Image: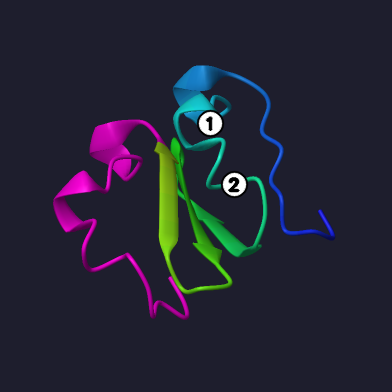
Amino acid sequence: KRDGSVVTWGDGNYGGNSRDVQEQLARGVQHICSTRQAFAAVTRDGSVVTWGVGNLGGDSRDVQEQLAGGVQHI
């Protein structure tokens, strides 16, 4: 959306459920990339938000510090 918020829908098994990161997707998203079952969004501050199937890219907790800022492209 124009304000940088993201709306998701569809099958939760394929990334349609972004409840766990809803606050982070409420504003400032600039780019979104996807795999078959996971998504990654880059925000204005360069942080990355992920959701979807964890072992297919939706869980970025192990690299959370590296994705906290300064990312320009995925």
Kindly identify which numbered label has been placed on residue 72: none
Side of 70 relative to 9 (left or right): left
- The span shown in magenta is 52-74
Count neighbours of disc 1 (C-alpha within 10 A) and say few if under 14, some if 14 to 19, many if 20 or more: many
Camera-nearest residue between 71 and 16: 71
Picture coordinates of residue 63, whole percent (x, y): 19, 58
- Indicate which disc, 1 or 2, sits on the residue closer to the N terminus: 1
Q: Nearer the viewer, residue 41 or 57?
A: 41
Taking the image as shown, residue 69 lies to the left or right of residue 59, namely right
According to the image, label 2 marks what residue?
25
Asked if marks 1 and 2 touch (Cβ < 8 Å), the reply is yes
Question: As displayed, is residue 35 above or below residue 10?
Answer: below
Q: Residue furthest right?
A: 2
Amino acid tagged 2: Leu
Identify the residue at image location x=44%, y=35%.
37
- The spot of residue 64 in percent (x, y) is 24, 56
Q: Is residue 15 above or below residue 63?
A: above
Q: Amino acid at mark 1?
A: Ser
- Residue at image coords 67%, 54%: 27
- As rendered, which of 43 and 40 lies closer to the eye? 43
The residue carrying mark 1 is 18
> Which element carries disc 2, helix, strand or loop?
loop
What x and y, as percent, mark residue 61? 22, 46
Element at badge 1? loop
Q: Is residue 7 left or right of residue 33?
A: right
Up-down relation of residue 27 to residue 74 (above or below):
above
